[in-house]
Structures are given as structure tokens and as C-alpha cells.
Image: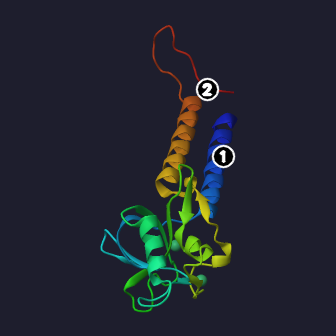
Amino acid sequence: MPKTTVTLILTCLLLCLFLNCALASAGEFDKVAAVSKVIDGDTFDLNTGERIRLADIDTPENGTVGYQEAKDYVIASVEGKTVYLDIDDVYGTDTDGNRLVAVVYFSYNSTHYENLNKALLDNNYAVLWDHDNEFSPGDWTLFVSASAIPEFSSIVVLLLILSGSFLVLLVKVKKNCSGKSCDTLTVS
Ligand SMILES: [Ca+2]
Ligand SMILES: [Ca+2]
């Protein structure tokens, strides 16, 4: 195999590895769905029928001070909208097994997504309730880059792999036609 081909293959593999690492550190999204109904400040339903409990925070219960404000904030932020869920990889659900425990992201602008759990804490609608799970609230940032969204990252990785494969093929393939314009494309 020509040296250039080997170099190209290794370069593509390294680029893919680097990109995957960069995207993984930006965020993890296990599920994408729309919010059908907000139950209270830390619980809502998805259009898939699943119920979500926001991880590591707690908002006031019905009938107590701050309940309606927290609920209204969540309604304004995500009800009827698409959310990007990082679901707890350790336990998945709460102790009842009925609600998926997750950190919830939603669109903030064309380049960034907002962490709803963090926003509720920062705006004093919720208190910290750091359970044993995948998440460490101290590591949360209010915004994450749009490149962390799965559809985008998958497309980028796919394009990179395809373009790398094309380059490799380009330098490996020899034209076998019999015409006058036939040239060998092998790169030395
Ligand atoms: Ca997860
Ligand atoms: Ca935790």
C-alpha cells in the first residue's frame, strides 16, 4: 500500500477520534422528543408517553410557595418544544421506576442549547438535590454548543468518514480505461 494512502487513512482515523472526543465532552444526548405537558417545576411528559424527572434538583410541591412560578418557567421554556435529554446512565429512572431521570436541554439560539436543570437552579426556582447518579451539578454549564446535538454530530462524523474514504480511494484507484486520457492516479 502506498505511503500516502496509509498516511491518509491514519489522518482520517485520528480526525474522527478527535471529533468524537470533542463532541462527547460537549454533552451527551440519549433521547430527543417533544414536551407534551408540564406537570410541575421538575416533572413533565413527552409526546412519547414517557415522564421525565429533572435530575439533581427539586422544585416546590403543589400548594407551596414557588410551585406555580417554577412550573410557569418550565412551561415557558419547553412545553410544546423539542428537548434533548441526557438520561441517567446509572439508574435510568427514579426509585419508583416511573420517571426517566434526566438533564434537559432546549434550543437557546442557532448555536447553543440551554440546560433547563441549571437554569432552574440559577433563577432560584429550584434547589440542589444531588442524588447518586451519572450527573454532577457542579460540572453543569448553562449553555452547550449546538455541535453537541446528535443529528449534527452524526452528520459531521459521517461526512468526515465519507470524504476520508473518497480521498483514500482517489489515490489508490488506477484508471483502467483504454482511451488516450487514461492516467494513473496513484500518488507517490
Ligand atoms: Ca446519559
Ligand atoms: Ca448527582
User: At x 59% / y 78%, what residue is drawn?
Assistant: 124
User: At x 64% / y 59%, what residue is drawn?
Assistant: 21
Q: Is mark 2 within 8 Å of ligand 1?
A: no
Tag 2, which secondary structure? loop
Front-most of 128 and 99?
128
Q: Which residue is mark 2?
A: 186
Along the horizontal axis of the image, is 122 left or right of 41?
Answer: right
Question: What amino acid is found at the position of numbered circle 2 in the picture?
Answer: Thr
Q: Is residue 77 above or below residue 68?
A: above
Along the horizontal axis of the image, is 135 left or right of 77?
Answer: right
Q: Is residue 61 above or below residue 78?
A: below
> Which of the 4 image quadrants contains residue 33?
bottom left
Residue 93 screen position, x and y as percent: 44, 84
Q: Which residue is mark 1?
A: 10
Q: Earlier in the sequence, mark 2 or mark 1?
A: 1
| Alpha carbon separation for disc pair 2 and 1 | 18 Å
Quadrant in which the N terminus is drawn: top right
Residue 107 screen position, x and y as percent: 49, 57
Q: Is residue 153 above or below residue 169?
A: below
Front-most of 4 and 46?
46
